[in-house]
Each structure stands twice: as C-alpha cells, then as structure tokens.
Image (cartoon, grey):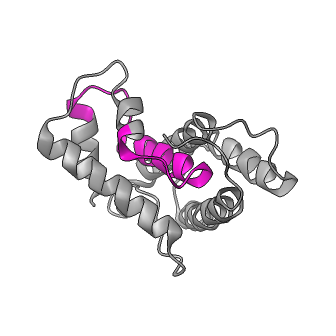
Amino acid sequence: MLYRDINAIITNIDADLSAAESHGMAAGMLCVNDRTEPGFWLRELVQDAGEFNDEDKSILQGLFEETKCLLASDEFAFELLLPDEETPLSEQVEALRQWCQGFLFGIGSTTPTSGWPEDSREVVKDIAEFTKLDTDAEGEEAENDFMEITEYLRAAVIFLRTGLNSGYNGTTH
C-alpha cells in the first residue's frame, strides 16, 4: 500500500496521526499479540476522530492483515510504512519518528514491558531513542544513517514479534 493513500485516509477522519504512526501502532500491537484483531487497532485510530467509510475501513483492515502476514513471514518481508524515496529526507525522518511513536503506543496498549526479557526491553529503548531523531537531516551520510535505522527497525520488530508472541498469554483484542 502506498503511504500517501493511507495517509489521506487517516487525515480524512482527522485522527491526529500519520500513516506512519498508525502503521507503527499496528506493528506494535501485533508484536506483542499476533491475535490482535484489526477492529481493536481501528478503534484506537478513531478514538476522538471521525468514522471511516466502508471503503477506507476495508483498505485499513487490509493494511493491518498484510502487516500481520508480513510479520509472521519467514522471508523477512516486513516493511515500515514510510514515504517513498522521492520525499525529502527530512519528511522521511519525521515519518520514521512518528512510526516509532506509534509502535511504542501499540506495544503499550497491549501489555506492560516490565516482565519482558532484557534484550527485548533494550530494543524498545532503542526504538524510544529513535523518536528523538533530528529531522533536519540531509546529505548522503544522513541518507545512509536513515537506511541503517530503517533496516535495524525491521529486524528489531521481527525479533520482538518472534520472542514476545512465543509465550503470549494475554487476551485477544
């Protein structure tokens, strides 16, 4: 799915979120509980906002289900929903920050991290640090750093999902 299409849907309901933050939230929820239902995520998105029309709701449910499948895949196919490479780097970095914020909200809405293994808590601390990235980044070095952080996040999310879902005993949302 294209970032701008999902962002337009999120913006249309006045959800005060971006597509990146919304996707991060879905990924966080699914990392902790792969039985999370799309309806739980959608309710979190629209808390104080408008409602989705049926077509938009279907598209968002598809994004959630696609995210769920990609996270469960053995092929390392999961991708963060971020603006494309044609977007200025500062906007890509801002979207990455928002994705991380959404991810942290997603894991926090599902379970406390206090009982997690130390290595999982360390990954969450790293993700929290990425919410502080400088959005004034530009140049080839900054682009390389952005790519490295994005790849780290992909691997970190899959690591968390694998480790945390193997022993999940919570309720289904």
Q: Where is the N terminus found, in terms of image quarters?
A: bottom left
Which residue is nearer to you in this view: 164 or 23? 164
Query: Is 134 on the left or on the right of 62, as rendered?
Result: right
107 relative to 159, above or below: above
91 relative to 157, above or below: above
Residue at left offset 52%, top offset 61%: 139
Q: How many numbered callouts?
A: 0
Residue farthest along the top direction in this orientation: 48
Magenta segment's dominant SS is helix
Residue at left offset 72%, top offset 47%: 124
Pinpoint residue 13: horizontal percent, then vertical percent: 23, 28
Residue 21 belongs to the span the image colors magenta = yes
Q: Which residues are magenta?
A: 11-39
For residue 131, which quarter of the picture? top right
User: Residue 83: in sight, yes or no?
Assistant: no
User: Residue 24: in sight, yes or no?
Assistant: yes
Residue 102 belongs to the span the image colors magenta = no
For residue 132, which quarter of the picture? top right
65 relative to 22, above or below: below
Pinpoint residue 172: horizontal percent, then vertical percent: 52, 43
Query: Is 68 on the left or on the right of 144, as rendered?
Result: left
Residue farthest along the bottom direction in this orientation: 75
Pinpoint residue 63: horizontal percent, then vertical percent: 32, 55
